[in-house]
Image (spheres, rainbow, N blue to C red):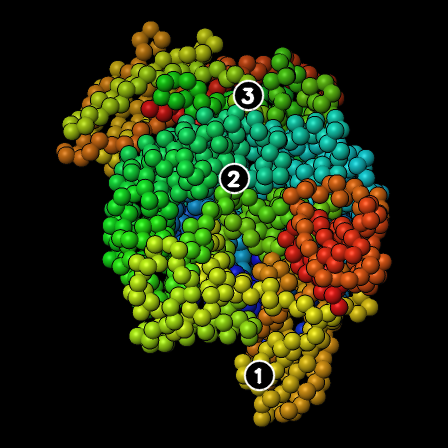
Amino acid sequence: MSPANGKEGTAFHISLNKCECKNTNRLSSPPAKMIHSLFLVNSSGDIFLEKHWKSVVSRSVCDYFFEAQERASEPENVPPVIPTPHHYLISVLRHRIYFVAVIQSEVPPLFVIEFLHRVVDTFQDYFGVCTEAAIKDNVVVVYELLEEMLDNGFPLATESNILKELIKPPTILRTVVNTITGSTNVGEQLPTGQLSVVPWRRTGVKYTNNEAYFDVVEEIDAIIDKSGSTITAEIQGVVDACVKLTGMPDLTLSFMNPRLLDDVSFHPCVRFKRWEAERILSFIPPDGNFRLLSYHVSSQNLVAIPVYVKHSITFREGSSQGRFELTLGPKQTMGKGVEAVLVSSQLPRGVLNTNLNPSQGTYTFDPVTKLLSWDVGKINPQKLPSLKGSMSLQTGASKPDENPTINIQFKIQQSALSGLKVNRLDMYGEKYKPFKGIKYMTKAGKFQVRT
Amino acid sequence: MTDSKYFTTTKKGEIFELKAELNSDKKEKKKEAVKKVIASMTVGKDVSALFPDVVNCMQTDNLELKKLVYLYLMNYAKSQPDMAIMAVNTFVKDCEDPNPLIRALAVRTMGCIRVDKITEYLCEPLRKCLKDEDPYVRKTAAVCVAKLHDINAQLVEDQGFLDTLKDLISDSNPMVVANAVAALSEIAESHPNSNLLDLNPQSINKLLTALNECTEWGQIFILDCLANYAPRDDRESQSICERVTPRLSHANSAVVLSAVKVLMKFMEMLPKDLDYYGTLLKKLAPPLVTLLSAEPELQYVALRNINLIVQKRPEILKHEMKVFFVKYNDPIYVKLEKLDIMIRLASQANIAQVLAELKEYATEVDVDFVRKAVRAIGRCAIKVEQSAERCVSTLLDLIQTKVNYVVQEAIVVIKDIFRKYPNKYESVIATLCENLDSLDEPEARAAMIWIVGEYAERIDNADELLESFLEGFHDESTQVQLQLLTAIVKLFLKKPTETQELVQQVLSLATQDSDNPDLRDRGYIYWRLLSTDPVAAKEVVLAEKPLISEETDLIEPTLLEELICHIGTLASVYHKPPSAFVEGSRGVMHKRLPARTGSGESTESPDVGAAAGGSVPEAAPSVIPSQGDLLGDLLNLDLGPPSSTGPPPSSSGSMGGMDLLGGGLDSLLGGDIGGSPAMGAGFGVAPAVMPASLNAPMGGGLGDLFDLGGGVGMPMGAYVPPKTVWLPAMKAKGLEISGTFARRAGVIQMELTLTNKAMSVMTDFAIQFNRNSFGLAPAGPLQVLSPLNPNQTIEVSLPLSTVGPVMKMEPLNNLQVAVKNNIDVFYFSCQYPISMLFVEDGKMERQVFLATWKDIPNENESQFQIKDCHLNSDAVSNKLGASNIFTIAKRTVDGQDMLYMSIKLSNGIWVLSELRVQAGNPNYTISLKCRAPEVSQCVFQSYEAVLKN
């Protein structure tokens, strides 16, 4: 959308005093590329930080965002791209903060969204949490970071390794030391990784204990229909790494069953050619925590469903009572225990209250939001957990017609649901022997059972 | 200790206190003070008053303090330009600092200070930094060129920075290459005609090499730049694809989508039987699916793009239906997009699954979502014939739930199902009628009324039902009023005996008590039809309606082509042409496909102006005298005294209804309408198309009336048509404009005659065009040098270019013009002969012609007759050749000459034709083939015009 020429819709437009001028001069100001400004907005709709990379854009541009926020029934329903007469607002919602980027012309929206995610990750990395309080407490560091991350709308340094060399994260100790010695938390040296062939790793890394840990974490998303059959199920997996190795280690990681991984996204450090040819991950790792790869096991493959639910939620016509029965059990868990089970469900609006008995754990029902949640804990295959009882409805109200969906969260330790297994991890390029460790875990993502 | 301390204020003036601290001798105190200033700045407080004090802190060897001061400078320099000059020296000095970090920081900050005076001082340091030995400095400097260009483009060109920037594309460091590409792309966008990014196989190779090594953001810039390249042949195209494919596995979704764009575009060049083509198709699916497991905001953008991809190449995702199933806790904007794609992917193979899902969704809580789900069931029925029965029964189940908005939505879609499968599911009408009272939304009411009218003969109490609607006629929305009018007329034609009173009532309500011109016009049209020729009325109103098409919301193919070339951009999110986003810069045309002819037609366009406006007659400002008179006639009608009795209807009324009409209707009809039966028949077109415009109910009478005259208004006279009056003096305060169009020596000219019929002198003439189908725009100002005295006439020739903004017009060759003089601005519209857009290099190679002819699908072919033309085939060929219609080959079969001809339009569209001339027969047959078949009609008219003059 071109700024300030009001040529929207089909209205016939003519700029009278400029009739004579040539076509090229139609814009009143040159189009500004990329991210123009950033506003941080909290859940109550206050702007608590603004940053402009070019000229200052008035806060009033956020009014369009607030309008959309008001229209949205839930905070997460605010549309991510909002057009305004002269700008576009692209926003993400993270940690209950909206990060609203203002752009003035054609910019790839994913580019902006990815960048905003990077900003969130960086804040989290620097301050431990990404909250309004943490950002306000570190406002100068935040400003320094934002300035370092984007130049004229072009991303400059977004790798946490490099940023940390440029701007030291605040710690209590450092603040104390700085005050005593008068030194600063801005690096004086050009970050070494910035231009090398391995921009993600700094040089001169030293550790006394050399260790490399990998976590294989899988999340299962599934929709189960009322009869218990799977409508769709897929696994989102990641391999997160924490690598603290001296020098320039060159690692290779191989899997027992790499053919599971046909849909993968890699950290830039992974040598793609080698993977294509040999299905081996070969890489010089960044220093510290990073996500080595994420993968997706699609609904085409058969995905094991680790738990089952038996449910019966019934209302009788003309009665003000309803029956509620729910039983959980393990299904395909590969012999591992299912833990940290949490069941939640949005009951129909007509339900006034519930009177239920859990065989284990605790349950709550919020009569205002109608949210039922049952903290089950561990599933004991010998004694299946159940939740039974009655629901009371408004007297005289008709039988509710919506069918509540049951959401289930759980964890299974020491197993990756897809069956993915690491074969071996080798290190080249350095002499020492590192500690190595691999952990597996399965979690429920969006695991829904329809009733 | 945290930064929040910087926000605490004291009672004494905050600014005053900061000022004191900034001027402190102690370094530590200074730094703390600057931090406080920055903190205030971040929350939007105005601390610009401290400018000189902060700038004084700039000369320091403390890097953090320096950075903070720079931050401050960037924010406030613009408001204090004179003060900002004070900082220049330090900048220049810093650009020579031994520490590359400081050099880069200085050049970066200087570029951000948008003060003209400073930019002059920036040139020398920038030149040095562009050639700096340290790549970090070079890459920062590259971006700085773009910044400087933004402030002062001329300066950048004069200083030769653009060439230096082009050289950086060959830099040894991939980050520098990426930044140079980014900077050049940005600059190129404000210079649409420059070939800054002159891509050739060598530079492409460099970019592809850099692609592997630069940062993720750099990869996006390079991929977006690659997408603009036009490979020479399919081999080059394949080799680029091969080198881009690994990007599909990148963790950054923006990189993935940019790579998808490059692949989707270059794939177009690959032969479909190539193995690699199939491999590529397979490789595209997983990354797209992966995007859907990302955060919801990313999913949304991905889904909007997938929507385009499945329209272009449904085979990529045809097996992935399940990933589009909606999850209970998806945000609403993701749910709605997923639904759309589910319908696009629905096929006989998966329809059972899809329907089961949709039925599930229809019981959810969110109203918008439920509505769309119900609508989706209807669309499935229309798309997959085998499922229609199940869809209808699902919809009936949903109607039984009696949830108000579900019922209304279901009725709207059932109406469409009736349109698609007539005489199949009418048994459900009874169920629908039960819900009549609960309908409160205009669309649902209109749909129900349509159903009652359409099937009036099967509904016993149709008249009662319609009558009940009629009671509150004036409170209904236009949509419902129009529908009610039509439905009652239908009812009358089907059951004339019982409904005479009803039809009179509705006609008088529509024509005499309504302010709405659409409604009034439609009322008069029916009235006239019924009174002049009831048989014709029956034929027109109860004509068999064309079946509605399977997919009503597909994006127009040329727009789709264009959007595919812009995957990942805002244009792709809004499904609008990129020109709607960046005025002045023109979208990248797809290489192998014809350029776009229309735009802004996206059915899902969120552009409220266009969507809500519906088809409100665009022609309003146009002045076409003959039609104006026609309209005048029609409107004059209700001025005539209703008591006057007209001549008896010309038709003797073979139909019973006519007699029953008796004098009742007649007496209602004022004026001598009966005298013009031909006109009545002409108007009959309006109701016939009416049901098709159910969804755009505003497209009623007035719009149709203007369309009617469209063909007549077309200049038929000569190759250079004689001048016609475009703007009569009475409509333009004494200025009369007549004119025509011509193509002379390859230049399109608008030849105007301006006559001053007013009493005063006219000066200051200027002209501007509205956006139009072929981007016509004045190439220069209107040359009226001397003032135009009363009664003086002047001839002006205005050269036109075809690079203006594009918007599809109806008719295609319509041009809306605004002319301004010292008195006022006047608007008129005119139509240009499309032949003036035929360019000189329109002669196609024989082989290419043959291949193209075969390649264009047969449904794009249209046939016309040219009557009464007495030329032999050679004369025809010569005559057409003079108008840039080139004969490529001639064949004689059975005494019939076949001429094969090609035309190229100024926007790159090719029109191929075959003209058959038989000796002794004055009627020629012509077949036109074109990838944009909408131009065929206009082109044919040009043929006729050229041949007959």
Is residue B200 rendered to the left or right of residue A255?
A: right
Q: As shown in the figure, which amino acid type bears the numbered disc 3?
A: Gln
Three-letter code, disc 2: Glu
User: Residue B689: x and y, percent?
Assistant: 48, 54
Mark 2 lies on residue: B550
State the residue position of label 1.
B729
Q: Nearer the viewer, residue B753 or A182?
A: B753
Q: Judge if badges 1 and 3 mark residues of a common chain.
A: no
Kindly report the distance in space between the C-alpha atoms of the residues bearing marks 1 and 3: 72 Å
Q: Position of residue B625 (x, y in %)?
A: 55, 75
Q: Return the chain for callout 1.
A: B
Q: Nearer the viewer, residue B196 or A194?
A: B196
Picture layout, residue B539 above or below residue B567: below
Q: Chain of mark 2?
A: B
**Which amino acid, by three-letter code, is at mark 1?**
Ala
| Count of marks, rendered view | 3
Element at badge 1? Answer: helix
Residue drawn at (22%, 26%) of the image? A315
Callout 1 touching callout 3 (CB < 8 Å): no
Left or right of residue B142, residue A241 in this image = left
State the image quarter where residue B502 is shown.
Answer: bottom left
| Circle 3 residue | A300
Report crowding for label 3: few under 14, some 14 to 19, many 20 or more residues within 10 A (C-alpha): few
